[in-house]
Image (spheres, rainbow, N blue to C red):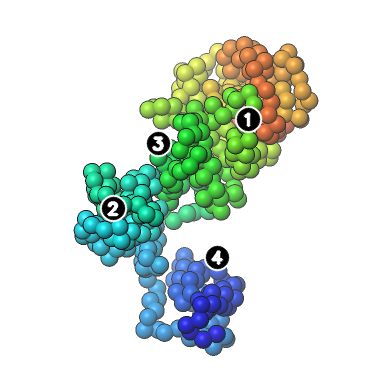
Amino acid sequence: MPFGLSNAPSTFMRLMNHVLKSFINKFVVVYFDDILIYSRTIDEHVDHLRQVLEALRAEKLYANFKKCAFGVDKVVFLGFVVSAQGVEVDESKVEAIRDWPTPTTVTQVRSFHGLASFYRRFVKDFSSKAAPLTELVKKDQPFVWGEPQEKAFQELKGRLSTAPLLQLPDFGKAFEVECDASGVGIGGVLMQDSKPIAYFSEKLKGASLNYSTYDKEVYALVRALAHWQHYLWPREFEIKSDHESLKHLRGQEKLNKRHAKWVEFIESFPYVIQYKKGKDNVVADALSRKFALATTLTSKLMGFESIKLMYAHDPMLKTVHDALEKGERVEKYQWSNGFIFKNGRVCIPESSWRELLVQEAHCGGLMGHFGVRKTLAVLQEQFYWPKMSGWIYQWTLSWDYQGLGGATIASLLSWIGSQRWLISFRAKNVMTPDM
């Protein structure tokens, strides 16, 4: 196809994808005539280069070596600086943003807004911060430059001039998602090891502006999951939440269509919740959904192993945890592989695990639909937490099961049974190999 025709770019892109299809997403990223080849070692890189160049030559496509860079550890690709450390903003673009004069026309605002939006993934809550400028670029909107616009302009310049280094995703590690909402926008951050990989933001409009605070927070989570679903669907990830929004949604006696749709979408992901209680932001609480408990718990699944972290912050179990961790004896309590047992029953800290276990025992489908006494009997045989009887009684009376699904506890019960030999030995101070 000759140059100049409207379909020429898409045709050329299709050709490049076809020629390099064996390498794309393995060690090649291609965008039209820009080909990025990435490798872990220099020997591996040489082999990757050879394969790509041979594939191009076979199709009579030849690289201009004057425009190529080989064996570098940092490269500018599609407006981003990519290195082994992560992704950052191109310094030349940072200088342009830093020196950008105050706009005096809608056209100038639109130019700045376009460049800033290109790097929005580097700025937390970009949409909320850029809202005054976004209003100006709307069709038939008069140009009015006041204090809100100047503040947004200067803040975006400052944020983009000092944009953080975004980590490259490591698909061998768990991702973390944290969301928030304001009056005019929603946002989120995708992380690994608490280091940002990308930021997401969206300006609220239409009916979403009238959502309650709780609904806006849940909506922020839904939009963030949809935005990063290609990262999140393959394996478990953590949702960092302040708990109240999800608690509010679960507490509804009857879900409306919007809430039901949101819950159905959220439950399609293999997530774990790590709750944050207000300003403390320390209580680690894991709720492993769907996939975590359906497999063997000894495989160190993220949700299950996180129970160990909760003991140190649980108001009722912290003292016991600290004593057992030091090797001290505590009457009726045992310590096994980081888990606390009381009289042979696993101690469940204050967390959404309690709700999950009661829900499954009461109406999860695995054991039938039990009443209060049967539910209590099943759980008390294997688990323990303070005031357990009253807690389960209140929950079973108030819970209107929505059929939202949940994990089974069959493997959990099996795991506890297999651990009891360790407890019996430890109670007699007999050393075991795993100690």
| Number of residues whose C-alpha sits closer than 10 Å to that of mark 3, classed few (under 14), some (14–19) or many (20 or more) | some
Give the distance between the C-alpha atoms of the residues marked 4 and 1, in whole angstroms.
Answer: 41 Å
Q: Residue at x 40, y 37 (%)?
A: 182
Q: Which residue is mark 4?
A: 25
Q: Which residue is mark 2?
A: 143
Looking at this view, is 100 or 420 the one in front?
100
Q: Quadrant of the N terminus?
A: bottom right
User: At label 4, which amino acid type do we have?
Assistant: Asn
Q: Earlier in the sequence, mark 3 or mark 1?
A: 3
Res 183 label: 3
Give the distance between the C-alpha atoms of the residues marked 2 and 4, in whole angstroms.
Answer: 45 Å
Q: Earlier in the sequence, mark 3 or mark 4?
A: 4
Indicate the secondary structure of the residue bearing disc 3.
Answer: loop
User: At label 3, which amino acid type do we have?
Assistant: Gly
**Are dots 3 and 4 in contact, CB under 8 Å?**
no
Q: Position of residue 404 (x, y in %)?
A: 67, 33
Q: Position of residue 5 (x, y in %)?
A: 51, 81
Give the distance between the C-alpha atoms of the residues marked 3 and 4, in whole angstroms.
Answer: 39 Å
Point out the frontmost of discs 2 and 3.
Answer: 2
Q: Quadrant of the C terminus?
A: top right
Q: Which residue is mark 1?
A: 255
Residue 394 in view (yes/no): yes
